[in-house]
Image (cartoon, rainbow, N blue to C red):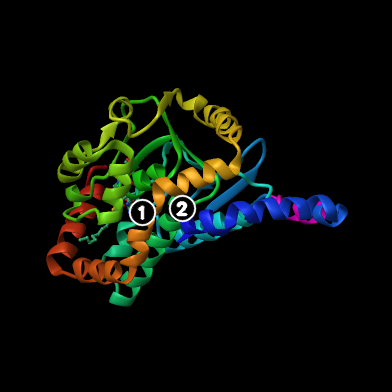
Amino acid sequence: MAAQAVLRSSAPARLLSGSFYIRKGVLASWQHYQSRRPFSNEKVLVELDESTVMKMKNPPVNSLSLDVLTEFSISLEKLEIDRGCRGVILTSAFPKIFSAGLDITEMCGKSAEHYAAFWRAVQEMWLKLYGSNMVTIAAINGSSPAGGCLMAMCCDYRIMADNPKFAIGLNETQLGIVAPFWFKETMVNTVGNRVTEQSLQLGQMYPAPDALKIGLVDKLVTEEKVQSTAVAAMSQWLAVPDHARQITKSIMRKPTIDNLVKHREADINNFVSFITKDSIQKSLQVYMDRLKQKK
Ligand SMILES: CCCCCCCCC/C=C/C(=O)SCCNC(=O)CCNC(=O)[C@H](O)C(C)(C)COP(=O)(O)OP(=O)(O)OC[C@H]1O[C@@H](n2cnc3c(N)ncnc32)[C@H](O)[C@@H]1OP(=O)(O)O
């Protein structure tokens, strides 16, 4: 849906609002100033310095709870309608962890209604980020399993900290769960069919150097340089005229987005019936216990 908007209205709308901006002078400047103030929810910080940066901040590991997903979608939507914002860098407020992926506790021992609301929020985050008109750059400053990898893959360009201890991938099968079709399609669009087929079945996590080799990330730099490299890459991406880049992005991503939009309700029902199975609940519980025991 969001990508459809790119083709139908967004590029012209931005051009129109640009001329409004010039004609309305002072009023527009004030509105622009208002909309460019940094804003912060509890768990997603938006900084407006040299570049616009969205920082996930949900201790300890940036797991994507219902709250985080909701804040994330709202923040992104705000930036999307801010005509002063053409690009956003997505990163984590914590060293060594980009995001631990979906919050497993949201998928354990809850009601069917809760699972449905949670999954809708996951879909919404993906629709907004994958379909964003803005240039999106992931500054992956640490490990990034499952939903964290999905977020990174939604971005246009990925820069990762060059440390083999940091790993990224869709590891769902390791938890006894299954990456749904739109996770799969996002990965196919990033690294191709063969690598995706193998990665998904094995639930493979790739240390940063291997992630670069398979094209899951685009560039490795030292941890300290992740952010500044993202800022430099942003300038390069923003040098391309918006309308041409946005329409091109939409041509690339629209079929994948349309596929989820078309099957959205069925996908929620599928998730709820899958996650409420006793065997799946047991697998998730065992995985969580193992995570806690490793200390
Ligand atoms: C057909 C299709 C139908 C649909 C089928 C269903 C599709 C579902 C798709 C699912 C997508 C997902 O993203 S599933 C999520 C997959 N995520 C993962 O596997 C990540 C697991 N976590 C890790 O590997 C590590 O924690 C890692 C992120 C690298 C950080 O390691 P550290 O040593 O720094 O930290 P830890 O000590 O492990 O973790 C700190 C605390 O955070 C907790 N924690 C860690 N990850 C967590 C998580 N994802 N959710 C909740 N809590 C988490 C730990 O239990 C600890 O809790 P305390 O002990 O209490 O402190």
| Labelled pair 1, 2 in contact (Cβ < 8 Å) | no
Q: Residue at x 50, y 49 (%)?
A: 57
Residue 168 figure quarter: top left
Q: Where is residue 34 in the image (x, y as percent from the top left)?
A: 75, 55
- Give the spatial CA distance, label 1 vs label 2: 11 Å
Q: What element carries label 1?
A: helix
Write the start and end of the magenta stretch as one range.
29-37
Assess disc 2: are there few (<14), some (14-19) or many (≥20) residues with their C-alpha within 10 Å of its C-alpha. Answer: many
| Disc 2 C-beta below 8 A from ligand 1 | no
Amino acid at circle 2:
Gly
Q: Can residue 160 be seen in this view?
A: yes
Left or right of residue 52, residue 149 in this image: left
| Quadrant position of the C terminus in the picture | top left
Q: Residue at x 28, y 64 (%)?
A: 107
Q: Is residue 89 visible?
A: no
Q: Which residue is drawn at 67% across and 39% down?
A: 49
Q: Where is residue 212 in the image (x, y as percent from the top left)?
A: 33, 27
Amino acid at circle 1:
Pro
* Up/down of 283 relative to 111, above or below: above
Left or right of residue 72, residue 150 in this image: left
Q: Residue at x 20, y 71 (%)?
A: 273
Mark linked to residue 230:
none
